[in-house]
Image (spheres, rainbow, N blue to C red):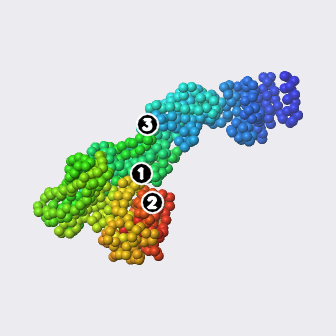
Amino acid sequence: MYKQLLNAILFIYSAGVGFKLSAQEVLKIGSNPYTINTNAVLDIESNTKGFLPPRMTKAQRNAIASPPSGLQIWCTDCNGSTQPSSGQLYIYIGSGWAPFETNIFPIVKTGKRSDEINKPVRNSSTSATITGILLEINGAIPIETGIVYRPITNNDFATLPILEEVNGIATTPNYKLASTSPVTKEGGTISIKISSIGKTPYYFRTYAKSYLGIGYGNPIVFNIADPSFSGLSVSSDTALEPTFNGILNVNAGTLSGAVTEYGYYSGTTASPTTNKVVLSTPALLTDLDTKLNVENFTANPTVTLTVPNFNTASTDQQYFRFYVVANGQTIYSADISFKPTANAVTGGAAIATLVSIIKSPGVITIGDEVTQYFTATFKVTKTGSYSAFYVISTSGATKGLILSDIIAGKWTTIGTNTLTFPLTGNPTSSLEGNSFIVSRLSLSFDTGPIKLGQPKTGDAICDDLHETKIVDIVSISGKTWMDRNLGASRAAISAADYYAYGCLYQWGRGNDDHASIKHTDAYNATAYNGFTSTQSNEDTPKHSNFIVSSVDWRTPKNDNLWQNSSGTNNPCPTGYRVPTSKEFQNEITLYNVTDSNSAYNSKHKFVLGGTRTWDNATVYDQGNFGSYWTSTVYESGAYRHYYDTQNKYVGAPARSWGWSIRCIKN
């Protein structure tokens, strides 16, 4: 041994490097051999050169048999690279190889919601499973692995869950769950099931604890609680047309796709499950999923719910509640109750106020003669003769029943008066479970005709007895428009709000009932009237049928039927008209309308009212397609603007199609 050391010293000396060896066997190597640190066994000094340890791959390092603690090497590929210049310095610490770096803790990864594998799993509304991977031990085998988590309250998305450094315990509001046995192999899975968790979103992250410290995985926001509702309110905009408001709260970290539908129910009993209206559309659900499908949140996503001008059928106590379908379950808001006040009947001279319409009790049996009545109560403020046209709608078969008629009479006293509308006939099919309501009612007094608004069933009626309520909006173009389609009972509250679809007109025709549509839900509708293939040679056909033709319902064509407010068949209210193609296009451009979502999000709240075909008068594409006529003609056709969920278009097709109308003020 002495001879080998002497040879080494002689070699160093011959290389021009000075040395000094004391009696205590202290060795100094370097450029200044005359000064030495007496506390060191080996003192190396240089201002121009460095210490170069043995270099090897990770596999070669791990092949060293029984390495002593303190053994040092340069591992050329321990950082994941095969290039020597990208390696790391390692020291054996007795239990394993540890790198010389700032982080000497185990390295773990928490599965994100967007991952294909190891993503968090919602087991129920109170249980979840969080999964992660132990990527690197970093020289110290973990003695504990698990998850640490904390609730996110008051939109505090900045504070992450953490354990006490010294003992690794969790203090409120931090919580932890440890693996039954610690994961000790690199690539091992850390999977923890939480059996009870609160109603807020949570921060989760996996961890691995060794005697050197605690290594944390990336934090994730995850939520398993169902959505909730807040901000419930009702305001009476008009007598029988309140506005309901609410907020749908969807916690951050909810899995995208969890919410599949939302809307509302209404009725005259508490906790209603009737009169369902779906507010969500594919575009709105996609927008919500976009908000949920992120990793970094700053707030919980919300959806503002507004149902304006809600139509009530009577002055009975009304109940209303929102709902949402999430994770396959239906969640309801609390009830919003409202008792409507009387709705004034206007037009001509206002002489009466409609108070309520109530169906008389009774059972309708097959084969028996039916005589039932709907009683309408009015507050009469001026006496006179009246003539009332009514239609009774039923939810099912109506064979053998008379559902519409005209009754006439004279009110001779001021105050409360009633009218009765009979439902008569001999039913020939089962009517079990059917509901009956007065869906169309118009009155004419000796002082002049009085029209009621659109039906309260979602139907759209465009004849000389019904009118569309006029509510103005002023566009950024400075033009004044109606806020709803002709025949709609309210301004839209979603792109697929079938109460806002309105009628489907053939170009150039007036309010002769050919455009009236029965909307049963956002995606289904039928026409009130039939069709004929006989073209009309008059500007005003003497019937309410839809006229099918490959070109025009009229022969020969007349280009002046909708020109200006004085057009022969102008269907818009007095002072309004069908817009020109240029006027409509200007609104599309100003509001950057590119599809149905942006069309609804404009101030006009355009809807997906569908179409009625020129060849067989089929009503279809409600909820998928919106199309609006203009007054501008082109050869044998006329311009219309239309859009679907992906694009917008403009064209000049045959005038025999049935499409929506939005009126502009003169």
Quickly name the residue at label 1: 280
Q: Quadrant of the C terminus?
A: bottom left
Tag 2's secondary structure? loop
The mark nearer the N terminus, 2 or 3, is: 3
Left-right relation of 358 to 525: left
The mark nearer the N terminus, 2 or 1, is: 1
Quickly name the residue at label 2: 625
The image position of residue 384, as x and y in percent, is: 14, 66
- Considering depth in this image, is 601 or 26 the residue closer to the camera? 601
Q: Quadrant of the N terminus?
A: top right
Using the rendered image of the protein, determine whether residue 355 is visible from the camera's viewpoint. Answer: no
The image position of residue 382, as x and y in percent, is: 14, 64
The image position of residue 254, as x and y in percent, is: 47, 43
Label 2 to label 3, Cα distance in Å?
37 Å
The answer to whether 71 is drawn above or below residue 86 in the figure is above
The image quadrant of residue 657 is bottom left
Residue neighbourhood size for the residue with mark 3, other residues' Cα within 10 Å, grouped as few (<14), some (14–19), many (≥20): some
The image quadrant of residue 33 is top right
Label drawn at residue 125: 3
Tag 3's secondary structure? loop
Left-right relation of 216 to 554: right
Q: Residue at x 32, y 62 (%)?
A: 461
Q: Cβ–Cβ below 8 Å for labels 2 and 3?
A: no
**Type of amino acid under label 2:** Phe
